[in-house]
Amino acid sequence: MNILYLSKDYPPYLIGGVGVYIDEISKLLAKMGHNVYVITKTEDAPIEYMDKGVHVFRVKPKKISILNGCRSDIKGLSERLEYSFAVSEKIKELLKRCPIDIIETSEARAEAFWHYLFRKNPPLVIKLHTPETLAFALDHTPKTLDYRLIKLLEEFWIAKAVQKIGLSEEVVDLTARHFSMKLKNIPIVPNPIDIE
């Protein structure tokens, strides 16, 4: 199977649990014989390399000039949309090189928003780890315009998935309540760990 993971976080640049999960699952699936790809972020020049059997593509966010006038008011949304633009361009390029059977990512950041805005393929799987806006709410972050737009983006992104899976029942329940969304019969897939 040809599997593509999207994660802004990937070793050696880790911020949280999603990056650790993508690192573990991608290498385990590559070890099992799957073709595994990861698109992740860089602040330097874009680069492509192999990491223990995983094809890694580092992309740099692309400035969207239409956002210039409002960037200071919607800084978080702008960052997500500009990173998503770079990710979506890399997906398009990768699809010309090889068939991708499935793309998996988290609900946070809508990392391929531009690709899936008008497309349905490859099938999109979203693993519910914890929406960023839920973490913001738990941290009592003010509900600014930026926050509200990011929340709408995350809700749109979750709805785009052909399949949703959950890290735990609790995360699925919190996500459903946070977005007032029906998330029934979501398979729970705990994070793997390489016991070797």
Image (cartoon, rainbow, N blue to C red):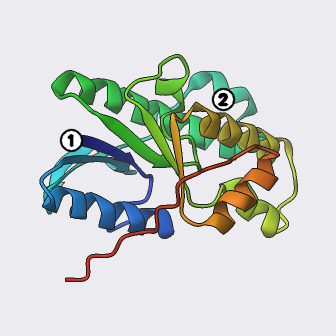
Amino acid type at image mark 2: Asn
Residue found at x 26% / y 25%: 95
Q: Are marks 2 and 1 in contact (CB under 8 Å)?
A: no
Q: Residue 68 carries which label?
A: 2
Residue wearing tag 1: 1
- Which of disc 1 and disc 2 is earlier in sequence? 1
Q: Position of residue 33 (x, y in %)?
A: 12, 53
Residue 3 in sight in this render: yes
**Quarter of the figure that contains the C terminus:** bottom left
Secondary element type, mark 2: helix
Amino acid type at image mark 1: Met
Work out whether residue 95 or residue 81 is closer to the camera in this orientation and state it: 95
The extreme bottom residue here reads 196
Residue 15 in sight in this render: no
Q: Is residue 62 left or right of residue 80?
A: left
Secondary element type, mark 1: loop
Image quadrant in which you'd find residue 192: bottom left
